[in-house]
Image: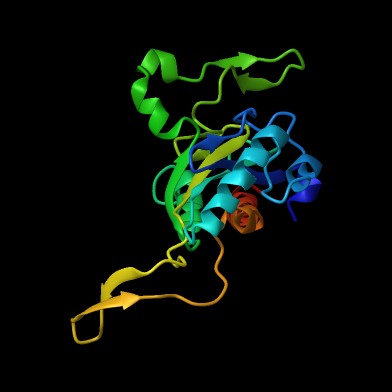
Amino acid sequence: MLAPLGVDVVAWVDEVHGIAANVDPDGAGVTRDAIEATPVRCPDAAVAARMIERIERARKDGDSVGGVVRCVCRGVPAGWGQPVFDKLDAELARAMLSIPAVKGFEVGSGFAGTLLTGSEHNDRFVRADDGAIRTATNRSGGIQGGITNGMPLAMRIAFKPTATIMQPQDTVDPDGNAAVLEPRGRHDPCVLPRAVPIVEAMALLVLADAYLRHRGQVG
């Protein structure tokens, strides 16, 4: 449905336990081949090796680590979304926060935007060399007032460490008495590589709804 419109959604592991990839926030130059070239699904090969090492260390320790998946939706036309109750960023947040282990969501500059002034944060509209209207920066993450502005939709999704770890943990039994939880079986030390296609699927579902709503309104 969205491919004929030129919409392309790509996600990758952007950070594992503080080890962050060195890639463009809007996904410029990031390809699916580069993402799938490493088991951790990070397009920065050098950083991916460090991420894998950190995950392996957690596995050997019977522990787990969390991190961040970055998702960029390219080619989304301006005008999708609603200004109040169904803001596109709110719909994306609802979809992403419904994924198990997700504990945080950002669009554009996210929490880092709180460190800027309005004059520093505002995205100025400009006419590009090809005549198209764009913004000089993309701190809004491609969404302004709940509606797409034609720039890439850039978001970050935070995943907590896997709760089930291979270490004894203090807890209580059904009667409220002190007990020790000792898990058995196989459990991932980091869920992020598995989460990448899930994030992409969620983003595509939200965008498909936004496209159908827009088409129903404007034809």
Of residues 80 and 9, the one nearer the viewer is 9
Residue at the far front in the pictured view: 60
Would residue 169 be found to the left or right of residue 177 on screen? right
Q: Position of residue 53 (x, y in %)?
A: 61, 45
Q: Quadrant of residue 28?
A: top right
Residue 93, above or below 136:
below
Q: Tell me, what colour scheme is on the image?
A: rainbow
Residue in the image at 27% along x and 73% along y: 171
Of residues 17 and 113, the one nearer the viewer is 17
Q: Position of residue 178 (x, y in %)?
A: 21, 77
Residue in the image at 37% along x and 19% along y: 116
Would residue 95 be found to the left or right of residue 30 on screen? left
Of residues 209 and 111, the one nearer the viewer is 111
Q: Position of residue 131 (x, y in %)?
A: 73, 16
Quarter containing the N terminus: bottom right
Of residues 44 and 149, the one nearer the viewer is 44
Q: Quadrant of residue 152?
A: top right
Is residue 53 among the parts visible in the rendering? yes
Q: Position of residue 107 (x, y in %)?
A: 48, 38
Residue 174, above or below 112:
below
Would residue 189 be found to the left or right of residue 152 on screen? left
Is residue 73 among the parts visible in the rendering? no
